[in-house]
Amino acid sequence: MRAPKKLSPIIKIAKYTLADEVQHKSFTVIFIMCALFVLFTRGCYRGNVLVNGHWLDAEAVAWKVSKMTFHIIATGTMFVTALLSMRVLKQDRDEGMLSCILSKPIDRWQYVMGKILGLWVLSVLFMLILHCIIFLIVLMNTGAIIPEYLIASFLCSFNLLFVILTVLLLSLLMPDIAAFLCLMGIGIISFLAEGIYAIAHSQLMQGMTQQSYSYPDAGPARWTIAYYFWPKLSGTQQWASSLIGNEAFHGFGPVHPLVNILFYCLILGSFLFWKFRNTDF
């Protein structure tokens, strides 16, 4: 009987958070704009396309376009999630809701957990609905069923959890907009690092390296170490998208990108609970 009593406040706060965010006009406008953008791409799934002198049929085009749209939706949802997360604690504090909730027999960790859960569920549903629209568009235009598309969408939800934890923690340490910009910086560096890593390990660069002079091994470069330990937002997204069509993924490094993100979520979550418990409101 003790477990349900502990979970009940968390679920109530999560429901309140989800309902409160959905009622904001800005969220409704953003969702409608994103849904319209996805619907407008349905014309790209029709007809054949000439690429490098080779004709691609409608099904091949659908695979290419759906993967590109998958990345756009996953990246855009992280941006929207950061916007939602940066004002949650400040809004409750300014409106007096935080003091009202904490005056009741609710532990602080339950409040934080409820906020995290509410934001995560909302963000996952936001992304999943948009991905489901693409899933249905491909099905109606080509008849192809891509169950891996929805699996990949679920795996990207851990990136959203990382975004929520990071922004909530940083919003306790700095102004909300600064927390948002820091998260954006982490994401941009992650995507740039993946691009540099892909170029450095491409066949062209490997051939150029083999033709160059060899020097004694001076140990791993600092940027390589930083790349492996930096939050792998882009790596997790790339790995998830590789499941669509069962494509090979060669960007693991010593640590799988999903393990990297889950490790950061654990660390950030621990610091968030500790910081919130020791903060006076």
Image (tube, grey):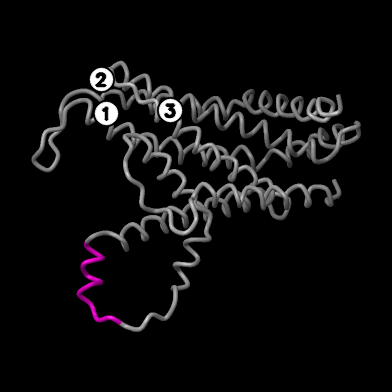
Q: Residue at x 55, y 25 (%)?
A: 28
**Is residue 149 toward the left or the right of residue 178 in the image?**
left
User: Does 202 sit above or below residue 142?
Assistant: below
Disc 3/disc 2 C-alpha distance (Å): 16 Å
Q: Position of residue 43 (x, y in %)?
A: 26, 24
Task: Give the main secondary structure of the magenta stretch.
Answer: helix
Q: Residue at x 41, y 44 (%)?
A: 239
Tag 3: residue type? His
Disc 1/disc 3 C-alpha distance (Å): 14 Å
Q: Are marks 1 and 3 in contact (CB under 8 Å)?
A: no
Q: Label 2: few (<14), some or many (≥20) within 10 Å?
A: some
Tag 1: residue type? Ala
| Residue sitting at the far left | 53
Circle 2: element type: helix
Going from N to C along the chain, the mark reached first, 3 or 2, is 3
Circle 3: element type: helix
Q: Residue at x 50, y 55 (%)?
A: 255
**Is residue 111 toward the left or the right of residue 193 in the image?**
right
Magenta residues, start to end:
204-214
The magenta stretch spans residue 212: yes
The one nearer the camera, 168 or 150, is 150
The one nearer the camera, 254 or 63, is 254
Q: Are marks 3 and 2 in contact (CB under 8 Å)?
A: no
User: Which residue is tagged 2?
Assistant: 142
Q: Position of residue 71 (x, y in %)?
A: 40, 39
| Quadrant assignment, res 42 | top left
Residue 131: which disc?
Answer: 3
Tag 2: residue type? Thr
